[in-house]
Image (cartoon, helix red, strand yellow):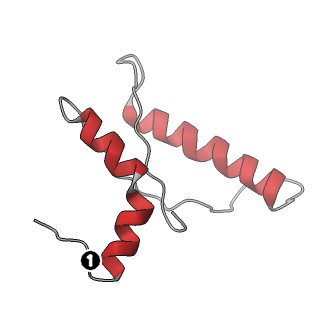
Amino acid sequence: MPDHVHMLLSVPPKYSVAMTIGFLKGKSAVRIHRELLRTKGTLFGRAFWSRGYCVSTVGLEETMIRRYIQDQEKNERDQERGLFDET
């Protein structure tokens, strides 16, 4: 999506969710700045991702969540056109 990211992750219990998300956001921001934006020097004090995040546990609904993520772009397009029924 142009303005947000959906991920389905399996995080071992020895790692906290906050640490995992912080690591992913930090490493991806550095890589995007270096490789796509061609930023040079230190990235200290720069912001790329928003500060927050949303996390939910996935139990028996993993297949449904996976399908939701895969179809997200189509679902949002349909929703913008008024074609998506939110029941």
Image coordinates of residue 22 in percent, x first then y, are 51, 42
Farthest front residue? 83
Question: Residue at horizontal 20%, vertical 36%?
Answer: 61
In the depicted structure, whether residue 39 falls above or below residue 59? below
Q: Is residue 52 above or below residue 61?
A: below
Side of 22 relative to 13 (left or right)? right
- Quadrant of residue 87 within the rendered picture: bottom left
Residue drawn where x is 35% and y is 80% of the image: 80
Q: Residues within 10 Å of mark 1 (few under 14, many from 20)?
A: few
Residue 76 drawn at (x, y percent) = 37, 69
Residue tagged 1: 83
Q: Is residue 86 visible?
A: yes
Examine the rendering and report whether any part of residue 56 can be seen: no
* Residue, far left: 87
In this picture, residue 12 sits left or right of residue 83: right
Which is nearer the eye, 30 or 57?
A: 57
**Residue occupying the point 89% across, 57% down:** 40
**What is the number of callouts on the image?**
1
* Residue 13 locus on image (x, y percent): 34, 18
Q: Residue at x 66, y 41 (%)?
A: 27
Find numbered disc 1 in the image and state the secondary structure of the residue it sits on.
Answer: loop
Looking at the rendered structure, the kind of residue marked 1 is: Leu
The percent coordinates of residue 8 (x first, y second) are 40, 38
